[in-house]
Image (cartoon, rainbow, N blue to C red):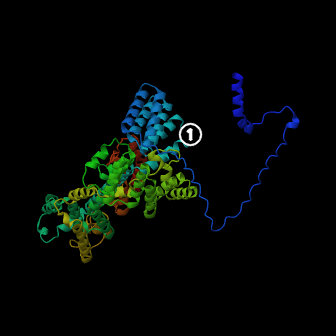
Amino acid sequence: MRRAALILILCLEAPAAWAQVRAPSMVDGDLPPEEPRPAAKAPRPVEAAPATAAPAPARAPEPVQVRAIEPVRTTWEGVLEDWRERRRAVREQDLAAARAAADRLLDARKDLAIDDMPDFAASEVRDAERSLAAHLPSDAAEHAELAVRLAPDLAEAWLELARVRFERDPSKVADVAPPLWAAVRAGVREPHTSRAFLADVLAAALAAVAATAAALLALLFLRRARVLFHDFGHLPVVRFLVPLQAFFLLLVLLGLPLALGLGPWAFLAGATLLAWFHLPWRERLLATVALAALAVLPAATGAAARVTAWTGSLAEEVFELEHVADGGERAARLEARADLPAPALAAIGRFHKRRGDLAGAQRWYDLAAKAGAPAAELLVNEGNLAFLRGDVERAKADWLDAADRATDPVALAAASYNLSKLYLRQSQLEQSQQARRRAELLAPGFVARHGSDDDFRANRWILDVPVSEAAIQRLAAGDPTPAMAREAVRARLAGRLPPRIWPWAPLSFLLLLWVAALLTRKVRRSVACDRCGRPACPRCEAQAGPLCGQCVHVFQRKGLVEPRDRERKEAQVRRHEAAVRWTERLLALLSGGGGHVWRGQVVRGALVLLGLAFLGFVLLFWRGLIPPPHATPFLLAGKLAVTLPLGLALYGLAVRDAWRRSRD
């Protein structure tokens, strides 16, 4: 049975097996002839496609893999925590932890796009000073270098670095010069420092002008007081009074402006009026300049305040919000104010963008646009928001539109720089290079300081446009402080005079003085005798000349007076010459240029008085009218190093010249 079943299976499967594989044969002759292998087909020649043939569909390019932009992850609370960690590590002498915390602070500064951390840098400067006092120059150098990295615009940090390098090796002057030059540039760049310096200079200059004008007018009056008192006694009403009564009447007239509350300018103008007709033309011109300078002093003070107003102003708030580390308190104060101008609104928007709040930034940018902010700057920043949200086409359109509209080099450079980054991500290398080259040509310093090719964080890879310095200066000019300063100075000078007549009434008074001088050129007036100083009056004596009648009879008409009277007159002349000589010397010792004015060299004396007064007020205002946010020991030292040698040299030359001329 089993054999029959096997034979049956083989019979059923035999045709299929034969069709697939032939059974092997034990005899070679039984094999069929081998079929030749088919020859490989020759490649078909490529023929030109007919004109009417449809082109083959192009293969879609593979998408370019680009690195994603990293969102802002740093928070202000994290910054403060890193700072506390550094302070703890420094206190516990854990150098590794202190340096790690410092690196995190610097990284957070980049992540939040903060230009300066002056509070932290000032603390590092103090640590550097303590390290120098403890004779630890290496630690001091580390603190100073971290300070300049935390706040590149803090001049004090650069000065401390220069001091540390000098303390470490005084022979290496080349290492001290770069931080000193960087301190100068930082001081010019940072408004707190530059405007405070300008305020000190202008305040010292204006105070010097006021002091010099008052001193000059007082000296001119006192120099002619004896002669004008003599002529005052010849007036129609006064001639009937005794000399003592006439003297007191003159004092009453002189002090009348002060008694009426008309201010110092009216007092000096009255003194000038009394001495006006006894002054030579050069002294009249100088007196006119002095009174005119006092008349325009309020306007000059307002102009000086306008270019130096900063502390407490809206301009300071906007600048600090744009460039300085802040926990959000300043932004909250600005947001609570009503009727903010466009620069402040744009600064608030950029503050939110730098913290990663894109929706809040867009809201404040929209308000800035309604308030009239420059369109190009807003388009660049709004394009940045669109790019960070993933809307590449909107970002490209905004940047191109900004490049077409921009007139500010910084805005145009930022738009071109951002376009270069976008073209690079789209593999458009030639366009990227052209846009990058254009940005570097327009604002090389701005691109070098804020741009980055390897940092893909949101605040580093593309550039925002900060509020321009011109816009911030306009905010400072609109501060009410200049008007208040102008009115305060005017009230101090004019007293109860109405504000609406200032300065036109004083200038009109000066014009009337010159008209009166021209009309009274032929009026006879007394002069001081060249020998004894007595009034040489043409009304009291027959002759009118440089000598009084007594000197004429004693020294020119010899033999007319007794020898005893002649000796008495000669002694009087010697006393007068000694009084003039010692008065010149005393005034030179007291004021430097007062001796020259008393001698009659009014121009030279006025210049010396002005120079010494300016240097003196610079030292007097050593703390500064606008003190810096962080007090620095270099301020007084720098002022002393510059002004004290100049002042002593000018004072010494003036006194030496006055004494030499008094001997001659």
Front position in the image: 152 or 336: 336
Query: Quadrant of the image for the C terminus?
Result: bottom left
Mark 1 residue type: Lys
**Residue 649 visible in the current orientation:** no
- Residue in front for this viewpoint, 440 or 616: 440
Secondary structure under badge 1? loop
In this view, the residue in front, 655 or 160, is 160
Q: Position of residue 365 (x, y in %)?
A: 34, 54
In the image shown, does 517 or 115 lie closer to the viewer? 115
Q: Which residue is mark 1?
A: 172
When asked about the image quadrant of residue 223, the answer is: bottom left
State the residue lying farthest toward the right.
29
Q: Is residue 529 above or below residue 171?
A: below
Left or right: residue 631 compared with residue 244: right
Tell me which residue sits at (41%, 52%) in the image: 386
Quarter of the image holding residue 566?
Answer: bottom left
Which part of the image, by quadrant, shows the N terminus?
Answer: top right
- The residue shown at (43%, 28%) is 90
The quarter holding residue 551 reads bottom left
Whether residue 516 is situated above or below residue 576 in the rendered picture: below
- Residue 368 coordinates in the image, percent (x, y): 33, 56
Q: How busy is the neighbourhood of tag 1: few (under 14 within 10 Å), some, or many (20 plus)?
A: few
